[in-house]
Image (spheres, helix red, strand yellow):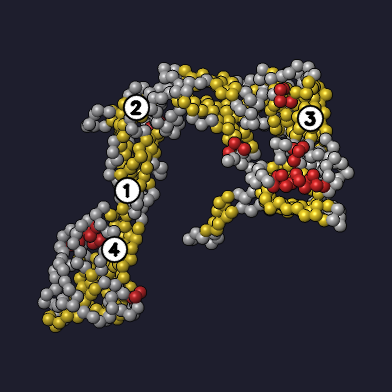
Amino acid sequence: MADRKIVGGVDAYVAQAAPSANRNGPNYMLIQNGSSGNTNRGFLFIKAPAPVQAGVTVISARLVLHLRSASHPNLTFHARAVASSWKARKITWNNQPDVVSGGLLGTAAVGSVTGAEKDSIVEFDVTNHMQAVADGAAWFGWRLVLAEENRWATVVTSEGVSEWRRPRLIVEYSNAPAPPVDLSPSGGRMVSIENPIFRYSYLDYGGSRELMGHQIQIRPTGETTGDDFDTGAIPASEPEWDSSDSSWSIANGGSWRWRVRSQDAAGLWSKWSDWAHFERLNKGSLTLNNPGEAPNDFVQDVTPPITWTHSGPWSQEAWQVIVQQQSLAGWYTIHNTGKRAGNDDSYTLPRGVLTTANWSTSPGTGWDVPTRYRVAVRTWDGQGRQATPGDPAWYHVRREFEVHEGATANVENLTVEQLGAWPFAILRWERATAPDYFHIARGGNIIKTVTPDEVDQGDGTYQWIDMKATLNRPHTWAILPVVNGVMSTVESTFIRTEVKSKGIWLLDPDRPFQTAVMINGLGGDADLTMQSEDQVEDHEVIGRSTPVRVINSVGLAKGSVSGVVSDYSRIPNVAKLEWRDRLRDLKAQPGKRLRLVTMDYNMPVVVNNVSDWPNPIEDVIEVSFDFIQDNVPSWLRS
C-alpha cells in the first residue's frame, strides 16, 4: 500500500451576520451554529494527494483539524463536499457555494471531540470523498459546520504558525495489480504431462503488493466462448497454479490456451492477461547405460565413457553431460559440457575431472575417504518444448557412482627418491607390458595421466618427475596402469616419502633442471613475505545498523623473496654466478609462468623486480624479487 499526507491548503470562513465580508487570512476559523442569523461556516480545500486517480482504491482517508478554543467540551462537526469552485480571498456568506448531494461525495463526514481544549484533535473519515476523487469526481474541498446549536469553536487554519497544527489530509490507497505477464506455458510450445504447473509474473507497482489470489481460465484452442475449465477466485501466495490439484487435465496431442487475473492483499483484481497458447506432446525415454545401476554403479577408471540411450518417436538433436562431486557442504559441479548439438550417445570424461577413487590402501596413507560422484545426462528432441516445474524441456537421467580400482596388473619395483638437493621427486617403476596409460597419484588424488611413450626409459622401465610436491612434507605416491578402461589397485604399489630442502626455489617448469635457482639466507633461511588481500567494499543500507560487505574479488597470494646464492656444497656443479645467470634469464621473460617451491608452498607465480648485487665480504650474491600467484590456466593465458 501507499500513503500520502498533505498539510495546509486554503481556507476561509463566512459569517451570516456579515454577509458581504470575507474572512480569509487569520490563523483560525470561527465556526458557529448560532440562532437569530448568527451562523459561521468554514471552507477548506486540501488537494487530494497524487496519484489519487482512476484505478486507485482508497483504503482510508482522514481529515485532521486542531482546535484553538471552544464554547463547550463536547462538539460535533460535519464536513460536506463543496459542489463548485470558490476563492478563499473572495468567498462571503452571500456567494458561498452549495454542497454536493447524492453519491459518495454527498455523504457527510462526521468529526467529534469530547473534553475540548486547545490542540484537541477533530478527525473526519473522508474515505468516501477521496474515493470519489479517485473515481474522477471534481474536487472543491469541504464545508465545515457545527451540528449543535448555540455553540462555537475556532479551528487552526493553514496560516497557523506551527505546521503540525495546520489542517492535514492523510490518505492510504492501493493500485490494482497490472495484468499478469510472462505466462508459462505459452507461445504454442509443448508440455509433456497431463497436469502442468501454470506460472506467470505478478506485477503491482503501487498497491498492496502481496499476492492474495488469482483466477485461471482454460479453453481449447479455437474456441472463443465458454471455458473448458475455470478455477474461480482461489487463494494464492505464489504466482503459479498446479493443475494436478484440480479435475482438469490435458490429453496427449491436445492444444489449449489459458489466461489469468490476480488479486492483491487489498482485494483489488487486475485485468485479465492475454491468452497464452500451448500443446501437449509426450516425450520418449532416456536411459543411462554407464555408469550402471546398483550394484554396478561404479567405473574402474577416471576417464570412463558416459553412455546413454535416447528412444521414442522423436530423435535426439542435442545433449549435455554434467558431473558433480560430493562434499560436506553438498554436491558441486566439477564438469559441464554445456548443450551440444548432435545425436551422440556417449561422452568420455577428460583427464582431470575424476581425480579420486575409493582406494584400497592400508591405514595411514590418508586415502581411505570414500568419494562419490554424480552424473546427469540431458537430451533434447527439437520439438519446441517449454520447461515448467516438474516437466523440463529436456529428457533427464541422473545417477550417483563411485570410482573403484580394477584388476589390471600393478606396476613393479616402484621407487620415489629425491635427485640430490633438487626439489623434485623422481618416480621410477617397471611393467612387463605397456598399458594404455599410467595414472600418477599423490595424496589420494590423480595428479597426472601419461602414456607409456611419454615416460618410457627402455626395457620395461619408466620414469616421471614430480615438480609440484611441497618440500619437507610426507607424501604418498602410487602408479596405476590402465588397460581397456580398467585401472589397477593401489594396494602394495604406493610409497610414502618426502622431498627435503632448506632453500627457496624458483624455476621454469618447462626446463626445470636448466633454470632452477636455489636461494638461501646468510647463516639461515631465505626471507619470504606473503599476503593475500581480497578486494571488498562496505555499503551502507538504509534501515540496517551494520554495513554490508561485498567481496569484489578474492586476492591471490603476493609477496617477495630475498636471500643469497652461493657455491653450495650440496650442488657442487653449479656455482654462484651460474645461479645468478639463471635468475637473470628468468627475469628476461616477463610474464612467464614459473613455480615457487618452499617448505610450505609449491605454486605457480609470475615474478618482477628481480635484482642481484654482490656481497664480496660473504662471498655470495644477494638476490631479491617480487611475485604474485598465477592461477590462470595455461590455455587461457595470452
Mark nearest the camera among 2 and 4 is: 2
Look at the picture and state if 334 lies above or below 611: above
Residue 599 placed where, x, y %? 78, 45
How far apart in space, not on screen, are marks 4 and 3 (Cα)?
83 Å
Is there a contact, CB below 8 Å, between mark 1 and mark 4? no
Left or right of 356, for residue 143 = left
Q: Is residue 260 left or right of residue 336?
A: left
Give the secondary structure at mark 4: loop
Sequence order check: which comes first, mark 2 or mark 4? 4
Disc 4 residue type (three-letter): Pro
Separation of marks 3 and 1 at Cα, in angstroms = 72 Å
- Residue drawn at x 79%, y 45% as measured from the top left: 579
Q: Is residue 228 above or below residue 144?
A: above
Q: Which residue is mark 4?
A: 49
Crowd class of label 2 (few under 14; some 14 to 19; many from 20; radius 10 Å): many
Residue indicated by mark 2 = 279
Badge 3 is on which residue? 427
Labels 1 and 4: the sequence-earlier one: 4
Residue positioned 12% across, 80% down in the render: 19
> How far apart in space, not on screen, are marks 2 and 3 (Cα)?
63 Å
The residue that disc 1 covers is 177
First-in-chain label (4 vs 3): 4
Q: Earlier in the sequence, mark 3 or mark 1?
A: 1
Q: Is residue 507 left or right of residue 72?
A: right
